Image: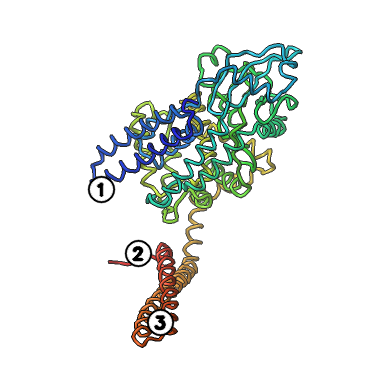
């Protein structure tokens, strides 16, 4: 790492973040116009980017995650960090050799004909070297960077301090990132990535998961040569999916590769369990035979059974154009804020799904992207923190597919792949057909009648809920009044005790006053918290 000193590293990161906080507050106090705010966010993004490249380590990954949050962060900031790559200069071979000697002991080089001293790839946590075993088999040797554990732990301590400060002193808008949850999830993912024995287990899991799928290739591993700091894998040659010229020379169809990608990633996104959280073009290659090659299983996320069921329902709803069902799934998954209007979101989904890719040729793509980002920010939409890594995986794969076949509509491409996956799951087409029927005007007519007939009952339920909320609010309000009255009584008792020279009276009164003041502040806090459940009162 370029910045070796922990103190120097901490100073740089803290000065960056606190400098950003102060600049934002200064602009808020002075009520700067939008044009000046855009310039500020551009400067912040540039400084943020330069600091990340200077410090490397965990911070590069933080920048990559933030670059996917165009729904929350300003466009001028995102533009500065959207092409962050996890590429850092390799370590000296002498440092790598020392790690290999420590991990393999006396067997160092006994199992190898040779190991190339120049790194094939170098990222923030590990480096990859090419070696040849005694039997002539080419292997990839992934070695953890020297002192990376210490650097990561330092970064986590710095980030925990920043998050504590942001949580207590920075007013975050509704629907913004839950930094504490994100930090916890990021810590789990990175700590897993630091232990190569866990990555080895993950590779074995994915090999078993895709053993019957011909379109995917996952490198074999060598457990006897692998440790927590070194991972030895089969060497696999492949073409980057972004190298369109090489794909064309090998007669590889962009549409077929896109479908293969979806076949590989649909099960990961829609089934409970682990998914590849970092499928950037360097980690997803294609063989000359058209097999999708998955590499680097260090960054892995997990999806629960409940969330997987709602995601499946969401995809079914989109493919059958049942947008009311899609809105319900989005609510259940937490993508829509409580005050979102379901009918408005339903109309927007219908308009979005009806967009034709051919229209892109006639548009200014940069202006369209900025307009989409502004629209998303204006809508009651959020990305739940637990889906940040899943969203990153989806957006990355979507970007690869868009690059492969820019003229093809993604929904139409995904439909047959999804139907094939659904049939394999044993979920026959009846579920999909039912979704399709529900989206038809005739069904919607009867559904509207049903909703009309159920309206009185729903109104009664809403009234009952509102009455309960009002009742609880009144309790808190009365308790606050009682604590205030008791505080006044306590002060009177203290004064009376001193006036009559009765220690017992003023001591009891001091106790009552202290308890009532604490009770007053507790009730005030509860009352303030409960206010968000109360409807706005007309002015």
Residue placed most toward the observer, 123 or 360:
123
**Which quadrant would residue 129 be assigned to in this image?**
top right
**Which quadrant would residue 289 be assigned to in this image?**
top right
- Above or below, comparing residue 64 to residue 257 in the picture: below
| SS type, badge 1 | helix
| SS type, badge 3 | helix
What residue is pinned by disc 1?
29
Is 22 on the left-hand or right-hand side of 309? Answer: left
Residue sitting at x 25%, y 48%: 29
| Nearer-N-terminus badge (1/2) | 1
| Nearer-N-terminus badge (2/3) | 3
Where is residue 251 shown, x and y percent of the image? 57, 14
Where residue 536 is drawn, which disc sits there? Answer: 2
- Above or below, comparing residue 80 to residue 19 in the picture: above
- Label 3–label 1 contact, CB within 8 A: no
What residue is pinned by disc 3?
506
Residue placed most toward the observer, 506 or 334:
506
Where is residue 231 shown, x and y percent of the image? 67, 26
- Label 1–label 2 contact, CB within 8 A: no
Where is residue 140 shown, x and y percent of the image? 65, 20
| SS type, badge 2 | loop
- Above or below, comparing residue 6 to residue 508 in the picture: above
Residue placed most toward the observer, 356 or 87:
87
Residue sitting at x 40%, y 64%: 528
């Amino acid at each position: 790492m370029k910045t070796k000193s922990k103190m120097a590293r901490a100073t740089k990161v803290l000065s960056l973040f606190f400098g950003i906080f102060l600049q934002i507050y200064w602009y808020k106090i002075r009520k700067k116009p939008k044009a000046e705010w855009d310039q500020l966010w551009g400067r912040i993004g540039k400084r943020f980017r330069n600091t990340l490249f200077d410090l490397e380590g965990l911070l590069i990954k933080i920048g990559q995650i933030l670059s996917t949050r165009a729904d929350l962060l300003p466009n001028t900031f995102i533009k500065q960090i959207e092409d962050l790559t996890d590429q850092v200069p390799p370590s000296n071979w002498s440092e790598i050799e020392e790690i290999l000697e420590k991990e393999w002991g006396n067997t160092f080089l006994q199992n190898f004909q040779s190991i190339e001293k120049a790194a094939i790839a170098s990222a923030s946590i590990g480096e990859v070297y090419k070696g040849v075993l005694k039997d002539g088999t080419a292997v990839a040797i992934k070695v953890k960077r020297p002192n990376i554990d210490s650097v990561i732990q330092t970064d986590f301590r710095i980030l925990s301090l920043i998050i504590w400060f942001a949580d207590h002193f920075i007013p975050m808008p509704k629907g913004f990132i839950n930094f504490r949850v994100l930090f916890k999830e990021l810590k789990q993912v990175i700590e897993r990535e630091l232990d190569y024995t866990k990555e080895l287990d993950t590779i074995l899991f994915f090999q078993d998961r895709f053993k019957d799928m011909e379109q995917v290739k996952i490198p074999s591993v060598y457990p006897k040569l692998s440790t927590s700091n070194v991972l030895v894998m089969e060497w696999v040659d492949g073409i980057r999916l972004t190298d369109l010229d090489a794909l064309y020379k090998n007669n590889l169809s962009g549409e077929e590769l896109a479908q293969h990608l979806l076949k590989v990633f649909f099960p990961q996104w829609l089934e409970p369990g682990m998914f590849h959280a970092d499928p950037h073009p360097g980690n997803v290659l294609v063989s000359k035979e058209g097999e999708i090659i998955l590499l680097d299983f260090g960054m892995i996320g997990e999806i629960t059974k409940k969330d997987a069921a709602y995601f499946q329902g969401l995809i079914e709803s989109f493919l059958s154009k049942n947008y009311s069902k899609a809105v319900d799934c989005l609510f259940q998954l937490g993508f829509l804020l409580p005050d979102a209007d379901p009918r408005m979101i339903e109309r927007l989904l219908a308009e979005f799904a009806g967009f034709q890719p051919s229209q892109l040729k006639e548009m200014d793509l940069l202006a369209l992207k900025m307009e989409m980002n502004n629209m998303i920010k204006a809508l009651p939409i959020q990305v739940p923190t637990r889906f940040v890594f899943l969203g990153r995986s989806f957006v990355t794969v979507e970007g690869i597919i868009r690059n492969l076949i820019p003229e093809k509509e993604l929904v139409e491409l995904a439909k047959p792949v999804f139907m094939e996956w659904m049939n394999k799951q044993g979920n026959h087409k009846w579920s999909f057909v039912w979704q399709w029927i529900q989206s038809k005007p005739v069904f919607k007519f009867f559904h509207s009648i049903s909703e009309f007939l159920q309206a009185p009952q729903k109104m009664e339920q809403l009234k009952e809920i509102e009455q309960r909320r009002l009742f609880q609010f009144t309790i808190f309000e009365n308790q606050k009044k009682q604590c205030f009255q008791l505080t006044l009584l306590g002060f009177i008792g203290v004064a009376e005790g001193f006036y009559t020279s009765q220690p017992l009276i003023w001591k009891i009164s001091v106790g009552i006053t202290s308890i009532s003041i604490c009770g007053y502040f507790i009730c005030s806090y509860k009352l303030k918290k409960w206010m968000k459940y109360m409807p706005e009162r007309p002015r």
